[in-house]
Image (cartoon, helix red, strand yellow):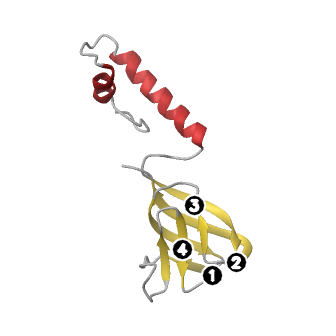
């Protein structure tokens, strides 16, 4: 399975009920092309990856991230402020949490209309 492929050759061959190796090269090429097509069409990564993205601050404590499911938020940064301690969204500690789709700041708010850089891990294994 090549990097970025959403499936592998044995799975495709099982699904198509193919037992010969005659078309392996063609099927492998198609897997790569269709995987790229799907991710380009939905405009997000599906496989687990680390993302570094810059957003415009909302003045609030929560916003949607581009890629999901969010596995963890590694850091939220603006100006001299950096928040990188993960916390439980229902706990009393300050930090950053996620519900799988959103970034949630606990105990603070991001600035309004200023760049906010978010580093997070999202996708399916």
Q: Do the residues labelled 1 and 2 touch (CB within 8 Å)?
A: yes
Q: Is residue 99 left or right of residue 81?
A: left
Q: What residue is disc 2 on?
A: 59
Which picture quadrant has residue 26? top left
Q: Are marks 1 and 4 in contact (CB under 8 Å)?
A: no
Residue 18 in picture, x, y percent from top left = 28, 16
Q: Where is 77 relative to 30, above or below?
A: below
Q: Do the residues labelled 2 and 4 touch (CB within 8 Å)?
A: no
Q: What residue is disc 3 on?
A: 65
Residue 56 in picture, x, y percent from top left = 70, 67
At a point 69% along the width and 71% down the height, the residue shown is 57
Q: Do the residues labelled 1 and 3 touch (CB within 8 Å)?
A: no
**Spatial separation of the CA atoms under disc 3 and disc 2:** 16 Å
Q: Where is 106 relative to 118, above or below?
A: below
**Spatial separation of the CA atoms under disc 1 and disc 3:** 16 Å
**Spatial separation of the CA atoms under disc 1 and disc 4:** 9 Å
Total labels: the figure holds 4
Query: Few, some or many C-alpha atoms within 10 Å of disc 4 (few <14, some 14-19, many ≥20)?
Result: many
Q: What residue is disc 4 on?
A: 104
Q: Which label was assigned to residue 109?
A: 1
Q: In which quarter of the image is the N terminus?
A: top left
Residue 109 in picture, x, y percent from top left = 63, 81
Q: Where is 51 relative to 33, above or below?
A: below
- Secondary-structure class at tag 3: loop
- Secondary-structure class at tag 4: strand
Q: Which of marks 2 and 4 is nearer the N terminus?
A: 2
């Amino acid at each position: 399975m090549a990097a970025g492929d959403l499936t592998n050759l044995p799975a495709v061959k099982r699904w198509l009920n193919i037992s010969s190796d005659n078309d392996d090269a063609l099927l492998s090429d198609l897997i790569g092309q269709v995987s790229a097509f799907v991710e380009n069409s939905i405009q997000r990564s599906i496989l687990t990856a680390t993302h570094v993205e810059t957003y415009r601050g909302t003045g609030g404590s929560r916003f949607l991230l581009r890629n999901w499911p969010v596995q963890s938020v590694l850091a939220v940064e603006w100006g001299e402020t950096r928040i990188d301690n993960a916390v439980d969204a229902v706990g009393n500690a300050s930090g950053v949490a996620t519900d799988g789709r959103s970034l949630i700041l606990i105990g603070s708010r991001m600035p309004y209309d200023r760049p906010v850089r978010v580093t997070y891990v999202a996708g399916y294994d």
